[in-house]
Image (tube, rainbow, N blue to C red):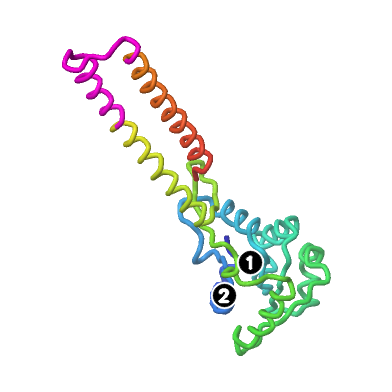
Amino acid sequence: MADIFISHVEEDAHLAIDIAEAIESMGFSSWYYERDTVPGRSYLLQIGEEIDLCRAVILLISSHSLSSYQVTQEVIQAYEKKKPFIPLLTDVSHDEFQTRQPEWRAALGATASIRIPQGGINRIIPQLKKGLFALEIQPAEHETVRAKFVDDGGNAKFRSFEDIEKHRKLMCTVVLLKVSTIILVMTLAVWAFFYVMTTSAPLTSGETTVVVGGCTAIVLCLRWTWRHLHKSRDGQRL
């Protein structure tokens, strides 16, 4: 999950890279197609997932992107998900983009836009930072770090590293319990053979019943604990 999704066309990829480097230098995370898309999966699903999970969308508005069907779909999805926009103008004016793209104008509403100067992105970094803070978006380092996984169905899943560590410890506990159970059962079997099945140290029928009943109770308790841990583990699977 990235803080900022950068919506742009291929012709503006160099600007998207510069923007990503600028906001990441502030401590924010970003997602843009050229670097972050995963080969083999549908790029449409990946873009949709990132828009759903991002906290804001930086929209690069240029003469190229205004005629892009893909960028329009990204704008619509971000609007439907109530994501805040930070529009950056390149080679078009604010009035021109509103005239050429009424759908974008409706989605952005009264959102203020800024122009990327000829000097490059670095000149508007302070404004970008103020804009993100005004949207109450803080750098990701203040939040729980999360990891992204892709399950067997091709769907993206996110879990905190704290949850992953808990899952690892639970797995270690399950393995330890299994080993302990095997050792206990083997020990009881050896003891039963030498002290119950032989005549060297015979037990009465009552003592034998108590021993067998106690061993059975121990094994059943371990089995119940084992199953309980398995259910807890299954509930925490990725």
Give the image quarter of residue 120: bottom right
Gap between marks 1 and 2 measured at Cα: 20 Å
Please tell me how many numbered marks the rendered image carries. 2
| Prevailing secondary structure of the magenta residues | helix
Q: Residues within 10 Å of mark 2 (few under 14, many from 20)?
A: some
Which x, y percent locates residue 4?
62, 67
Q: Is residue 183 left or right of residue 100?
A: left
Return the x and y of residue 200 as percentages of the image width and height: 16, 16
Compared with residue 2, is residue 28 higher up or lower down, i.e. above or below?
below
Q: Identify which residue is drawn at 55% across, 72% down.
A: 13
* Depth check, front residue: 24 or 233: 233
Q: Is residue 192 left or right of residue 138?
A: left
Q: Residue furthest bottom?
A: 119
Location of residue 27 in the rendering, given as x and y in whole percent from the top left corner: 57, 75
Q: Nearer the viewer, residue 156 or 238?
A: 238
Residue matched to label 2:
27
Front-lying residue, 182 or 197 = 197
- Provide residue 57's location: percent of width, then percent of height: 67, 67
Q: Amino acid at mark 2?
A: Gly
Q: Is residue 223 above or below residue 156?
A: above
The disc at residue 188 is none
Assign a secondary structure to mark 1.
strand
Which amino acid, mark 1? Ser
Q: Which residues are magenta?
A: 184-207
Q: Which mark is residue 7?
A: 1
* Foreground of the two, 140 or 33: 140
Sequence-first disc among 1 and 2: 1
Q: Residue at x 49, y 66 (%)?
A: 35
